[in-house]
Amino acid sequence: MATAAHRIARTPEEDGPADEAALAVAYEAAFDAAVAADERIEPRDWMPDAYRATLVRQIAQHAHSEIIGMQPEANWITRAPSLRRKAILMAKVQDEAGHGLYLYSAAETLGTSRDELLDKLHSGRQKYSSIFNYPTLTWADVGAIGWLVDGAAITNQVPLCRCSYGPYARAMVRICKEESFHQRQGYELLLTLSRGTPEQHEMAQDAVNRWWWPSLMMFGPPDDQSQHSAQSMTWKIKRHSNDELRQRFVDICVPQAETLGLTLPDPDLRWNEERGHHDFGEIDWTEFREVLKGNGPCNEQRITQRRRAHDEGAWVREAAAAYAEKHTSKDTVQNGATRANNGAKDGEAAA
Ligand code: BYC
């Protein structure tokens, strides 16, 4: 039986000459039906231009966050306190690079090249997550990033595994599995520090104090100021609003902080029996907006380092392109030769 998604995969050519306006209406209706039926929209399906643009915006911002997000933690690779911690941290930072690759590939299925997206990141025309504009001052920050930043990422990203756009949803499945490992390593690191010497405990507490509020900002502006949420939820790109996910994250963190023996730096944090959730204090949205404008503590450093890494990697891209080119031409020659050979053999057989 043809599903709505199959119907929208049909192109105008397949439908034969018809009234273009009527076709556009039919495609839009089929797209809406596919979304309503929780079917996946795939790259070759018809989709509204605004849906495509929204996905490119969100996936690009997400991909950029993954690769910029390598920087704060990479800062501690050379100073990890043991070989075990160093190996774990290197694996984690490498995972983030991989996540960037899956996401840039997902964006490519929408017709946007990785070069184009990187160019927009480097020229400041596309954003990355606010969270990566804060410094990693001590080793405990690696733990706080794992517990809070990766924890917030999982809370936000698990629902994205059900995103209406197939390639993004599928990329998120693997990303979430890896993020879950990242979150646990951060939690275990903080637990070790918290149960260590008084100085180590204090270092863990200080890191949590500094990362708590920026982690809450990761979920984006409050719902009444979120310009994209309503449309993204109608399209089932987002499944929950920013405030819903933020609340879920706070509710998850409170008991975890108790087990860690650490406090969350919010005097207004308390259980609300009536709501069945924790109330929490006012987020400093002025700080959030300033970070988004480029005025956070590390914005300049992060983007400068990213541009430098890109420039220094130019020779790798050139070598890879030359290698691919060489193999394509070799394959073409070889395929040509094989075809000629096969032709000759067929001729022999016929003779
Ligand atoms: N930082 O209408 P809204 C990671 C922007 S990676 C910066 O609510 P939307 C990790 C927003 O883009 C973490 N900008 O937007 C990696 C929009 O501006 P534009 C990244 C933000 O899209 C390595 C404007 O504010 N995760 O976890 O409906 C190591 C209005 O917002 C932020 C993702 O990207 C922010 N925090 O919702 C460890 C997940 N918040 O584009 C961890 C996928 C909002 O109009 N993305 N803005 O100029 C999403 O789920 C959504 O895009 C957001 C925002 C919830 C972030």
Image (tube, rainbow, N blue to C red):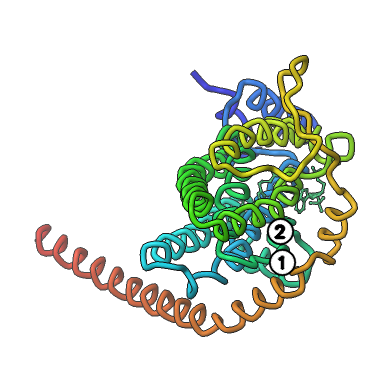
State left or right for residue 9 relative to residue 18: left
Give coordinates of residue 345: x percent, y percent. Answer: 14, 64
**In the displayed image of the protein, which residue is found farthest to the top?**
274
- Kind of residue sitting beneath label 1: Leu
In depth, the one of 229 and 129 nearer the eye is 129
Give me the residue at 78% from left, 43% from top: 50
Give me the residue at 46% from left, 43% from top: 177
Name the residue that disc number 1 marks: 121
Q: Is mark 2 within 8 Å of ligand 1?
A: yes
Q: Is residue 49 above or below residue 338?
A: above
Give me the residue at 75% from left, 37% from top: 242
Name the residue that disc number 2 marks: 128
State left or right for residue 307 relative to residue 289: left
- Kind of residue sitting beneath label 2: Tyr
Q: Is residue 14 above or below residue 276?
A: below
CA gap, disc 2 and disc 1: 8 Å
> In terms of image quadrants, where is residue 22?
top right
Give coordinates of residue 82: x percent, y percent. Answer: 40, 67
